[in-house]
Amino acid sequence: MISRNFKNVLVVSLGFLSLFTAYGGLQSLQSSLNAEQGMGVASLSVIYASIIISSMFLPPLMIKNLGCKWTIVVGMACYVSYSFGNLYPGWYTLMPTSVILGLGGSPLWSAKCTYLTISGNIQASKDGKKGSDVINQYFGIFFFIFQSSAVWGNLMSSLIFGQDTNIAFIPEEQLLTCGAADCGLNISANSTTTRPAQQLVWTLVGCYIGVGVLAMLIVGVFLDNIDQEQSSQFRGNREPFCHTFLATFRLLKDWRLVTLIPLTMYSGFEQSFLSGEYTKNYVTCALGIHFVGYVMMCFGATNSLCSFLFGRLARYTGRAALFFLAALTNFACIMALLFWRPHPDELPVFFVFPALWGMADAIWQTQTNALYGILFPRHKEAAFANYRMWESLGFVIAFAYSTFICLEYKLYILLSVLLLTVVTYPIVEYYEYKNPTLPVHEGTYLRHKETIQTHDKNIICQTEM
């Protein structure tokens, strides 16, 4: 039989799979589906700007008051509201729902990361294993299931939009402007980004709303409230409001967190490039909007499989080797995208880039999340709030300049942030190797109904290079 903690990891993973089947599909289509006046990209920028604001104060407050489980449910409801906004997309519907999603986004992800970290530490103590190994494994399992949401969400959009034959025509003169050959700012005016029939859009968004509500039900019904006792104690013995409000910023006193900012922001840059720039300037421009889903399915499938693989492989190779592999892969892709001129006759190439990008993103996501949980075990909520805040800043910057600067310069910016990451990350890793993070007592995470033992085997070493 599987352990209770492993069951909870599966429940969280399936809930996020269902939720991001909807949101992931919508995000991939925004730059093409709502291209008028850059409305789709603008909504994404508003989302991540709101996430930055919520990261400053909401995660510690919500997690400590509601507990991880109900914080996740509330955050999911915020995501579902964005799907409703896409039923009748306009500035007055997309912008408010984008703000709502953003405010719920940071607490949602912080609660998820905190929940997996607590579960990993509990299970590691029971099995006599290192906490870092189990946490890495749990994050690998989560991202294996979660990243497959890109497959299902984009499959739905491809099958539904594929019924509209009017969106498949590509004029020959437009192919000359695809990729980095031209500036890439005027593609939205061309015929390839014509919206599919409104009835098909309603059908797709209706399906997305359904799977979003299903996510809330899965977590609300089946997930254990493992930190219920801590939440009750917090509500009964409240800390000063300013103490909790400023928890995210206080952690910035730790130089390790500051040094990890380029790595964290790069995660936002690279994800936004694939979903916003690659889909619009390469796929939609040369193949048509109905191919966006198929290309992003390739990304999601590769990301999912590699997340599971690297989550297990990390204990043998260490994080540093995996991060180097991800950086090398992204560097090669960026250089190739600078010179590649997309054409429909080269159909397989359109899938090679998202496959390689998915492999690299699997490392960025699993290892960076696990790294934050390992380095800051006593300040998990604030640490993951910082992670979400700085990653979201990367999204905001990338989406904000999306409609103002040429694709070539966007690739140069992405490359610059990657090189900065390669310089700063090893500093933290080397320091952690020489000065391992102090151990955490597993009893801190147990509920009051469980017996807290004090043997040496319950002291968990938190890190391994």
Image (tube, grey):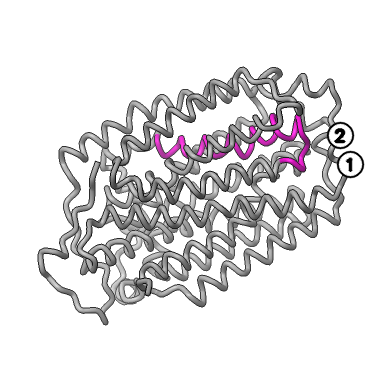
Q: Is residue 185 visible?
A: no
Farthest residue, direction right = 166
Please tell me whether the stretch drawn in magenta is mainly helix, strand or loop.
helix
Q: Residue at x 48, y 68 (%)?
A: 11
Q: Which of the two residues, 211 or 94, is positioned nearer the viewer here? A: 211
Q: Amino acid at mark 2?
A: Phe
Residue 166 - label? 1
| Residue 56: percent from left, percent from top | 42, 50
Q: Quadrant of the C terminus?
A: top left
Secondary structure under the numbered disc 1 in the rendered image: helix
Residues packed near mark 1 inside 10 Å, few (<14), some (14 to 19) or many (20 plus): some
Residue 420 horizontal side relative to residue 53, left or right? left
The residue segment tinted magenta is 263-291
Residues packed near mark 2 inside 10 Å, few (<14), some (14 to 19) or many (20 plus): few
Q: Which of the two residues, 268 or 52, is positioned nearer the viewer here? A: 268
| Residue 75: percent from left, percent from top | 53, 62
The correct choice, above or below, for 362 with respect to 323 in the image is below
| Residue 181: percent from left, percent from top | 69, 17
* Residue that numbered label 2 is attached to: 169
| Residue 412: percent from left, percent from top | 53, 21
Residue 162 horizontal side relative to residue 62, left or right? right
Residue 411 horizontal side relative to residue 58, left or right? right
